[in-house]
Image: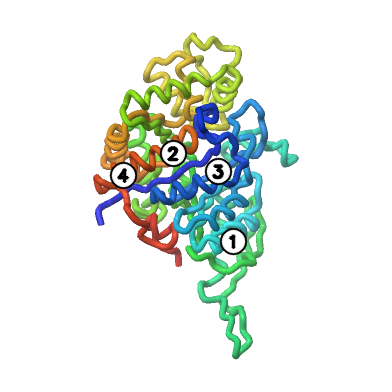
Amino acid sequence: MPRQMHLGLFILGTGSHIAGWRYPGAVKSFQDFSAVADIARTAERGKFDLIFMGDNLNADPAAHPSYTLRLEPLTMLAAVATATKHIGLGATVSTTYSDPFSVARVFASLDHISGGRAAWNAVTTANPAAAANFGTVHPDHARRYEMAGEFIDVVTGLWDCWEDDAVVADVESGVYIDPAKVHSLDHEGAFFKVKGPVNIGRAPQGRPIILQAGGSEPGQQLAARTADVVFSVVQEIGEARKGYASLKDRLAGFGRAPEDVTVLPGVMPVVGRTDEEAFETLAVLQGFIDSSNGLALLSDRLGIDMSGYDLDGPIPDIPLPDTYHSFASVMLSKARRENMKLRDLYNLTAAARGHWVLCGSPTTIADTLEEWFTTGAADGFNVMPPFFHKGFEDFVDLVVPELQRRGLFRTEYGGKTLRDNLGLARPA
């Protein structure tokens, strides 16, 4: 078959726009499971590959509402698994503030519950405020990635402790588990010591899908070695092509092929039946931004308190933070390239938390996505609606049919598992 896009849905219940919940009729809570289930069913109706839920390990009332008030991802997705049949279920769990044995166990469990649809977004946790909730000190950027590499190796090793046919359940012989097909891990490294095996059999996918989003040099190296899907932060097609090529070129060094990793840039689509209607919707959303939540998000992304700077002045010369490194790099690069004022950067950040905003009619949006997909900038997209439900339903009902008409996106699911639908081989 010809190459087709993959689509993920990034769920923030109140929308990716910081004030999306204020749009008339928008979902106003990320603690309402019925709303989450409706979102998941809409994504499945749109034939999306997966829904993906980020996570946050600290609460700040000034931050994005869905950062502060949310259901715990794995608990939520286990429930979503019973409300859906095909769509992949991705959840974020930190490699800095978790332990490998528990992570291996819960994602194997989700894979069994969902029939092979689980995905783990392995993140290092950028926000240093999380450390206070775990009684520790936040590691620096380099150390977080060293920990993450070993953490992922331990988790995948635990998943591999069970052979596919280890569970015999032979009534006549009385043998339930063949001990010769269950192995210890006996890992002892710089950060973790884990004997194994994990106490759940091999997952339906062999290994649940591993997602990552790091854009720094260590992040790209880790992704090239371990990730199945990479969510990238980009603002324009030229930088997207460079990042895409950089990641794909690294794969051979780890014995992997370009098709082994799916790259999905984040995009916040604001859809209207015409370009004018779409820009009117965006203008309404931008009108809801106030200085407190907008500045809090900008300060969080840049790693420095921005409240003392003149919004109508130039962007100050600030170093890249040790926290949201890739977000800050992409945003500051765009701001300097386009000679933005600080207020422009403030509005950009508030609109989609530093991600790419694409505004227009179904044809305009499909044209742009097609260009990115066919010219080496993406394998698909991580869709980040500004609000739910209409902000997402418009994409499913208007943009997806246009992509399907062009032969760029599936009309039916092709496999039973997330790994099947992504076109990725099952690990031996």
Residue 359 is left or right of residue 88, and the answer is left
Which callout, 1 or 3, points at the residue further toward the start of the chain?
3
Q: State the residue lying farthest toward the front.
A: 25
Where residue 392 is drawn, which disc sits there? Answer: 2
Kind of element beneath mark 4: helix
Residue 422 is left or right of residue 97, and the answer is left
**Residue 50's spot in the image, x, y percent?**
45, 50
Q: Amino acid at mark 2?
A: Phe
Disc 3 to disc 4, how far (Cα)? Answer: 24 Å
Could you tell me if residue 304 is visible in this image? no
Disc 1 to disc 2, how far (Cα)? Answer: 29 Å
Disc 3 to disc 2, how far (Cα)? Answer: 13 Å
Q: Amino acid at mark 3?
A: Ala
Kind of element beneath mark 3: helix
Kind of element beneath mark 1: helix
The residue to which callout 4 is attached is: 401
The residue to which callout 1 is attached is: 109
Q: Are marks 3 and 4 in contact (CB under 8 Å)?
A: no
Q: Is residue 160 above or below residue 212?
A: below
Q: Are marks 2 and 4 in contact (CB under 8 Å)?
A: no
**Viewer-nearest of labels 1 and 2?**
2
**Viewer-nearest of labels 1 and 4?**
4
Q: Is residue 16 above or below residue 153?
A: above
| Figure disc tally | 4
Where residue 88 is drawn, which disc sits there? Answer: none
Q: Residues within 10 Å of mark 1 (few under 14, many from 20)?
A: many
Which callout, 3 or 2, points at the residue further toward the start of the chain?
3
Disc 1 to disc 3, how far (Cα)? Answer: 24 Å
Residue at (52% x, 76% y) in the render: 165
